[in-house]
Amino acid sequence: MKVALLGDTHGNEEWIRHALEEFATAGLDTIIQVGDLGVWPGPAAGKMWNKIDELLARNGQTMYVAPGNHEDYDRIDRLEARDDGWLRFRHHILLAPRGHRTELGGRTLVWLGGAASVDRGWRRYLESMTGQKTWWHQEEITAADVEAAAAGGHADIMVAHEAPHGVPSIERQIAGNPGGFAREDLMYAHYVRRAFTDAFEAVRPGLLLHGHYHLPVDELVEFDGFRTRVFGLSLDGDPLSLGVLDLDTLEPGFLGGEL
């Protein structure tokens, strides 16, 4: 069984439509999205997601999401869980609560969304000046989230927005791009990433799917006592944000070719 993989979309309707059509052409009707979907406040965003849901329905597709850090968590917190635990954002767009456990194609999956915004200070300032909210404290991965993800032990696949400490390509990007962010926000991001790493080390997945860094990643990484294939997807507008996963072999790849 093969499923589609989709990186950060940031509510980019044109790109989301392009991605869904590419997946439909490839015969992929199950889509795993790794966060920063674009759950924005306001009626315009709601209308956009209604149209995307209609396209998913026409294509016979369902999108499963591990929410990121740029999402309206006040809205997400109001969503009702289905009997199977999924939060219904739309009929064909389902959001995973943190630590959610599922099975797909004979594989076990654990879902752990959330991550830290390194521009948290700027987003807070913007809200104070304009009243426009673009940062939600619920983005943070908490000790309770770690406990929920770790409770079921090992899973074949971990679907997340964040990635753990110790992935060489991500560490190089962070070291080379300080970005002028406030020290307190960088420390906050480090703390949240450490919490995610604790959950990751408890789950010890064979494959990690993630977004967040706007960087395509495909590395086999040695951690403390285990090895994980880390597969990161890029962001909207980049072909390397579209991927496919063969669940029979647990082999991910980019839809348009190799990295």
Image (cartoon, rainbow, N blue to C red):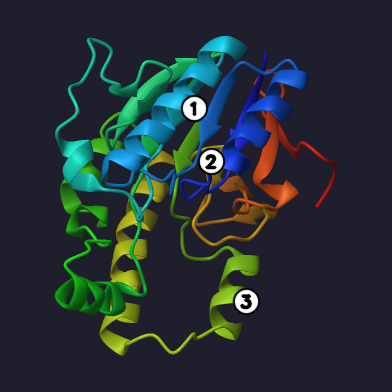
Q: What amino acid is at disc 2?
A: Glu
Q: Nearer the viewer, residue 56 or 100?
A: 56
**Dot label at residue 13:** 2
**92 lies above or below 140:** above
Are dots 2 and 1 in contact, CB under 8 Å?
A: yes
Question: Viewed as shown, does residue 255 lie left or right of 187?
Answer: right
Question: Viewed as shown, does residue 42 lie left or right of 15?
Answer: left
Q: Where is residue 32 in the image (x, y as percent from the top left)?
A: 53, 30
Say which quadrant the N terminus sits in. Answer: top right
**Dot label at residue 52:** 1
Quarter of the image holding residue 173?
A: bottom right
Badge 2 or badge 1: first in the primary sequence: 2
Disc 3, SS? helix
Q: Where is residue 77 in the image (x, y as percent from the top left)?
A: 16, 37
Q: What residue appears at the point 26 percent right and 48 percent down from the top-left corner? A: 72
Q: What residue appears at the point 35 percent right and 80 percent down from the top-left corner? A: 186
Q: Which of marks 1 and 3 is in front?
A: 1
Q: What amino acid is at disc 1?
A: Ile
Q: Is residue 170 visible?
A: yes
Q: Name the residue under label 3.
A: 172
